[in-house]
């Protein structure tokens, strides 16, 4: 594993006056570049040839430099990494970045400085470690079942290979579940029952909270040495979200959970207490489990029901795509900042403040 | 009942140069404080200890002064009220304010000046008086049934004790309704059939319109001596709104109507005619029923269907939580004001204009 | 048909320094006037008497001049048209404009200059020509069935007279379809099977993309001599979108597809590639089919499904009502312009740039 010491040594040779904000051209890169350019950072996008035109089509979000690669994974090549270092790049990881490059590759092979604490990848990409993190944080999570025969409620099932939501399914009973798993094994979607993640189906309203844990600004909810800011929230839109349009005989294709986009929403104000409390608990637990813990943006994926409160089903320890709703700020940043503030711009602002106070090492790894 | 004369007498002793905008820390208080601070008013929040941190977490919406109370109802205590008067406070009522303090308590025991006309509480908190108001305004409302046996359509039923939407239910026939009411009586949820409100279930799209009736600004739709502004609209999000995700066997818990948050939307432009017309009718009727009628923000809760037009099912005669979507203004305020305008800021602006023209007495009680 | 030569001849007599932006008071007129006023154009609204108050209720979107007509079609009268010419008016067509006036009337009788290329009306208002356009563009469209007996999937059926979505329906099989068509013929909703449009029901998430094809600004995705800008997107709200609230026995009235309003949303960033590509193809095909092709705003109405990609089911070659969500700009205009930019303002900006460079003839007809 590449240590934080190695990153710091390399970073010490950077020309900080030419710091360049960089990411791969996908997911939330428009927002990241837009925020960085707003704060006068140089920007560099690593792109596949077919996507480049998208980033050229939005001039205020177009990176100053493009590096073209055949596939995103090629960012790991010595050539590309050395070029990134030469350009004094800090990489901003996002959801697709981790998905395309792979957590292990980032930990073991990416020697370019990244914004945030890359140790989080160990805790987030492994389902059982993520559950340990939630337990440490004292959060309510859905019940999990090892054995289909134990199932005594409606369940939501994910296969490990199920890309982006296709292949997830619901079962209403142990019998239905066993039948569906049997069929999946016949179709070789899974090899054994153990591979399937079987969770209690939690009814309620989905809220995806966009947090930012800052060590540089004095805004938001004090949590140990930093501040927790609630930058926004969203609801994801999946084919299942249009299922009612197929009533009464809903076509099977609607039962698909691929995220296709996002919608804005706000939370009942009296629930903000729980929302901020959950965010703070996740930060505190992260500081105990993998110091210095979370740095920068993260997202809690929750479902709210009046009789259950919030159930947390996932954490994303980086900028999430739902923040793309708010390139000019959200209903919550209005109460935090006197200027438009996206999560992309917030990242750039954190880097700028750290740069000005010579504390960049605290927020890179 | 505390008369408007008493309020005016007390208010005449206020130091108007130190007027302070105050409310209890819940519902839309962030927006109210944010708007007030924007216009340079002093702000004061009455909070329970456990909520205070939320209002400290958003610096631009943090009140200048906190008063901590054990429970919100303690705002009625002589101590707290005298402190509010001492600080030259005007209270901005919101949905939770009325719910926590109680309409009767506000009318009989709250001697601090409130923004708006508190007489509206008599007409809004009593279901039959609210219907009288709608009749006077000539608005279409859902059919109501006294006796379950009269029911000849799908109905929506509310129990009086049903807090925030839990306990509301649908019945498809007189038989189903009678069965459900029988069960509710056995469970002692209600004592008699009379307690249940039985309304025709109205199919269509929900629109919650945010109006502001102003006596101070010359913007919006002229209605008698004032102007009616459409500041925005929203759709509420309740667990029922995710029910389709449980298809085909929807878990019972989804049939819950607790408001958990809000989503933005806009109305087909040709329907604005009806929307403004309904708002104007509600204002005009209020002026006849309880002069001077509605002052400031109110919300009409409607359902639109092409073959029925708009059905109105409730009025909230104060700022509603859906306005929290728009701390920087809505798609409709863009056509009204040359600056970002939330309902919270709009309230502060009305107070400021009244202060400048020495007409505060007209909009307080 | 009124030729572009005739329009140009008439336009050559205009006093360009007094150019007036004009439309009928419906659909997106508030946005159009608001954008025009922002850029200091004079504005003129043609209105029926009952709607005028709506446009007076929003001062920043109120046209400088009103012309009252008994019904919108009266805009075709010699009197009104001559008055529009006298006032140096350019008409901005919108959805209701075409619906109320009629495509043939616009082509044959409207001699006032219109923004855009009115030839598009020939290709858009005729279902089979629109399909030819999509074929030319290489877009995926839903399968169509001539004969109900050929139907082998869930289908979506529209009657030609079905106004605004009422009367559209779903059928799950050839048998159900034949039964429903038989009933429609008995009720004289249609005369023959041929009148019904029978399309494959496409499951997935609806995205309505708001494009602008510009000849004047150097922003966006280069397509031949112009640039394609993605200004935003929306989802329409129809009674069917609340159908789940009637579960389990959904009342028939929910199966109505009248557009009542719109909700904002964003698209997964990696899908922008396909989105821009589709927009470019539609522009390129339009340039081949009816030169100079599309000019200004247009909308592609799509459904996305992971296993099908985007299916396009309609093009609107003008400003669509969903743009009313963004009078201050959308999450996408944030990456294009350093100022708030609605589609209405974008139209005015295109006219302003053309005026300044003396190229108005290129974008009028």
Image (cartoon, coloured by chain):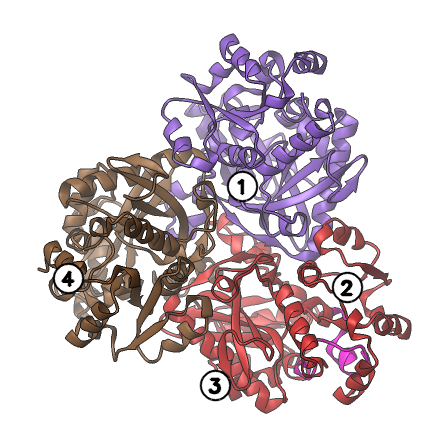
Chain colours: A purple, B red, C brown
Magenta extent? B100-121
Is A274 left, or right, of A343 in this rendering? Answer: right
Q: Residue at x 21, y 72 (%)?
A: C75
Can residue A248 be seen here? The reply is no
Query: Which SS class for mark 1?
Result: helix
* Residue at mark 3: B138
Looking at the image, is C320 positioned above or below residue A68? below
The local crowd at label 1, few if under 14, some if 14 to 19, many if 20 or more residues have their Cα within 10 Å, is many
Q: Label 3 near label 2: C-beta < 8 Å?
A: no
**The N terminus of chain A is located in which quarter?**
top right
Dot 2: chain letter: B
**Dots 3 and 4 on the same chain:** no
Query: Which SS class for mark 2?
Result: strand
* Residue at mark 4: C10
Q: CA distance from mark 3 to mark 4?
A: 50 Å
Q: CA distance from mark 2 to mark 3?
A: 41 Å
Is C257 left, or right, of C189 in this rendering? Answer: right
Q: Residue at x 24, y 41 (%)?
A: C283
Q: Label 3 near label 1: C-beta < 8 Å?
A: no
Query: Which SS class for mark 4?
Result: helix
Q: Let me know if residue B104 is in the magenta part.
A: yes
| Label ID, residue A322 | 1
Query: Which SS class for mark 3?
Result: loop
Dot 1: chain letter: A
**Dots 1 and 3 on the same chain:** no
Q: Residue furthest right?
A: B79
* Place of residue C122 in the rendered image (x, y in percent of width and height, measured from the top left): 15, 54
Q: Quadrant of residue B291?
A: bottom right
| Label ID, residue B42 | 2
């Amino acid at each position: 594993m590449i240590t934080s010491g190695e990153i710091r040594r390399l970073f010490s040779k950077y020309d900080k006056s030419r710091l360049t904000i960089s990411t791969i051209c996908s997911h939330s890169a428009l927002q990241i570049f837009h925020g960085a350019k707003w704060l006068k950072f140089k920007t560099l996008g690593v792109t596949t040839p077919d996507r480049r035109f998208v980033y050229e089509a939005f001039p205020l979000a177009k990176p100053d430099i493009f590096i073209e690669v055949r596939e995103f994974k090629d960012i790991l090549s010595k050539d590309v990494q050395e070029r990134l270092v030469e350009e004094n790049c800090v990489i901003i990881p996002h959801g697709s970045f981790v998905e395309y490059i792979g957590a292990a590759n980032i930990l073991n092979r990416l020697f370019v400085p990244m914004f945030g604490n890359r140790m989080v990848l160990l805790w987030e990409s492994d389902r059982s470690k993520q559950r340990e993190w939630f337990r440490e944080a004292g959060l309510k999570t859905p019940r999990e079942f090892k054995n289909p025969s134990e199932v005594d409620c409606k369940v939501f099932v994910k296969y490990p290979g199920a890309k982006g939501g296709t292949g997830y399914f619901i079962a209403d009973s142990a019998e239905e579940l066993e039948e569906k798993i049997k069929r999946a094994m016949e179709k070789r979607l899974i090899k054994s029952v153990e591979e399937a993640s079987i969770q209690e189906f939690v009814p309620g309203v989905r809220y995806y909270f966009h947090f930012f844990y800052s060590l540089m600004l004095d805004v938001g909810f004090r949590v140990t040495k930093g501040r927790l800011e609630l930058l926004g929230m969203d609801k994801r839109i999946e084919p299942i979200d249009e299922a009612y349009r197929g009533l009464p005989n809903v076509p099977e294709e609607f039962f698909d959970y691929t995220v296709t986009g996002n919608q804005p929403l706000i939370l009942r104000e009296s629930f903000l207490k729980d929302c901020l409390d959950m965010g703070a608990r996740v930060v505190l637990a992260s500081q105990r489990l993998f110091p210095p813990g979370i740095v920068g943006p993260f997202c809690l994926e929750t479902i709210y029901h009046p009789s259950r409160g919030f159930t947390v089903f996932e954490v994303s320890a980086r900028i999430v795509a739902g923040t793309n709703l708010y390139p000019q700020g959200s209903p919550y940043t209005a109460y935090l900042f006197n200027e438009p503030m996206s999560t992309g711009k917030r990242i750039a602002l954190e880097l700028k403040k750290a740069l000005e106070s010579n504390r960049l090492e605290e927020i890179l790894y």
